[in-house]
Image: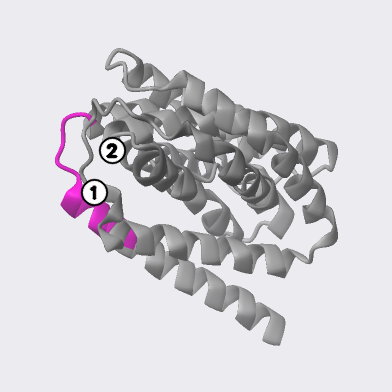
Amino acid sequence: MTSLPWFLEILVGVGMGFCSGLFGLGGSSIGTPILRLLGLPPLIALASPLPLTLPSGIGGAIAYRKEHLIYWRIALLTSLWGFPGVLLGAWITEFLPGTILMLLTAGFILSVGVYGLSGLRNRSLPETKVQLHEAIIPYWSPLLGLINGLLANGGGLLLVPLYQLGIGLGLRAALATSLATVTLMAIPSTIIHAFLGHIDWELTGWLAVGVFPSTYLGSKLALHLPGLMLSRLYSTFLIVLALYFGYTEIASVIK
């Protein structure tokens, strides 16, 4: 049981879900640093938001389903090839110092922000492109799974460019398919982290109250709003958050 007020936990969940649905990447990434900055232990802050990938992904998938943007075959293949990496990454967390995991998380969030500012995310490819390069999935999925398990993170930073630039999906299809994949890959990761005692289920429950409806709202808005400026602002926020979060973790060790 955490010492945080329940309404604050719900508010964190709202931010996680809305960003995940609206931007398709990095939404779950803000959960860990914010919870850690609020004073929670590293492993609890790392893994407690993980089960929320399920309602978050489901909420986003519902919004995208009517648009027929989810490529379920690609999501399933990515998940199947990524499962071994997920299990290995989650198991490794038991042996790494919390500070190392937090610094790796800060680096991951920083990468999300840099990717958002780079313009690659908004590179336009035809949504109806017929020739898809699924053959690369077995080569990249284990790495995606390892990151998913190690950082208890959906890995949307890597999934979206893989689907968009590597496989050949359009941007909106890549975002939608990444949500489906993240949902599938979160299942084994959640099981391992729960078995290791890294998840505070009461905290997860209050976060979930905010995550599910806000993810759906964010996904619906993403279908109608021009997101370039919002994406750049959000990416800048992530960069600042990552740098500050990393600084506080290093400062705590030095003290």
Give the number of the disc on residue 171.
Answer: 2
Residue 139, by quadrant, is top right
Q: Secondary structure at mark 2?
A: helix
x 52%, y 60%: residue: 108
Q: Main secondary structure of the magenta part?
A: helix
- Along the line of sight, the residue nearer the viewer: 118 or 104: 118
Q: Out of 36 and 138, give the one closest to the viewer.
A: 138
Quarter the C terminus occupies:
bottom right
The reply, left or right, for residue 94 in relation to residue 146 is right
**Residue 54 can be seen, yes or no:** no
Q: Is residue 136 above or below residue 249?
A: above
Which residue is rendered at x = 54% and y = 78% of the image? 247
Specify few, some or many for label 2: CA neighbours under 10 Å numbering under 14, 14-19, or 20 or more: many
- The tally of labels here is 2
Instruction: State the SS at label 1.
Output: helix
Based on the picture, tell me whether residue 225 belongs to the magenta stretch: yes
Magenta part of the chain: 223-235
Q: Measured from the top left, where is residue 119 in percent x and y?
A: 25, 57
Q: Residue at x 31, y 38 (%)?
A: 22
Discs 1, 2 touching: Cβ within 8 Å: yes
- Determine whether 89 is above or below 201 in the image: below
Residue designated by label 1: 122
